[in-house]
Image: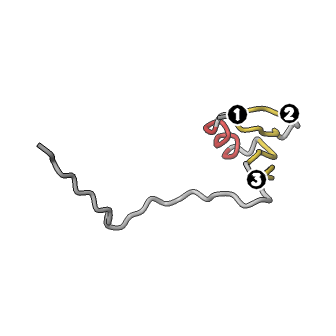
């Protein structure tokens, strides 16, 4: 899946999700399109980097063997 972006020089491109993240991290784009519409970097709410969970694993994963 490709995401439409507008670079800081005004050029429009379609980029992969990985390329989008790199462009955001290096502050090379002004806008990118989400399902809801265009997102303006530095203005619209963005996801924050998440810190990995450090607590006890609470998932219940019982695997039963069947003969």
Residue sitting at 78 percent across and 57 percent down?
42
Mark 1 or 2: the one toward you: 1
Instruction: Write down the quadrant of residue 61 in the picture.
Output: bottom left
Separation of marks 1 and 2 at Cα, in angstroms: 12 Å
Q: Dot 1: what SS?
A: strand
Residue shown at the point (70%, 45%) measured from the top left: 24
- Give me the disc on residue 11: 2
Q: Which mark is residue 36?
A: 3
Q: Secondary structure at mark 2?
A: loop
Could you tell me residue 34's position as x and y percent?
73, 48
Position of residue 2 in the picture relative to residue 57 (left or right) = right
Quarter occupied by the C terminus = top left
Quadrant assignment for the N terminus = top right
Q: For mark 1, what is the residue?
A: 15
Tag 3 or tag 2, which sits nearer the N-term?
A: 2
Is residue 67 depicted above or below 50 in this figure? above
Q: Nearer the viewer, residue 39 or 27?
A: 39
**Label 2 CA crowd tier, 10 Å (few <14, some 14–19, many 20+):** few
User: Is 34 on the left-hand or right-hand side of 65?
Assistant: right
Q: Earlier in the sequence, mark 1 or mark 3?
A: 1
Q: Are marks 1 and 3 in contact (CB under 8 Å)?
A: no
State which quadrant residue 18 falls in.
top right
Residues marked 2 and 3 touching at CB (< 8 Å): no
The image position of residue 16, as x and y in percent, is: 65, 34
Q: Residues within 10 Å of mark 1 (few under 14, many from 20)?
A: some
- Disc 1 to disc 3, how far (Cα)? 18 Å
Q: Camera-side residue: 17 or 21?
A: 17
């Amino acid at each position: 899946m490709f995401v439409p972006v507008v670079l800081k020089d005004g050029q429009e491109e379609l980029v992969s999700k990985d390329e989008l993240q790199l462009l955001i991290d290096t502050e090379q784009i002004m806008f990118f399109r989400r399902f809801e519409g265009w997102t303006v970097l530095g203005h619209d709410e963005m996801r924050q980097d998440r810190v990995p969970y450090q607590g006890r694993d609470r998932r219940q994963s019982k695997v039963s063997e069947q003969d």
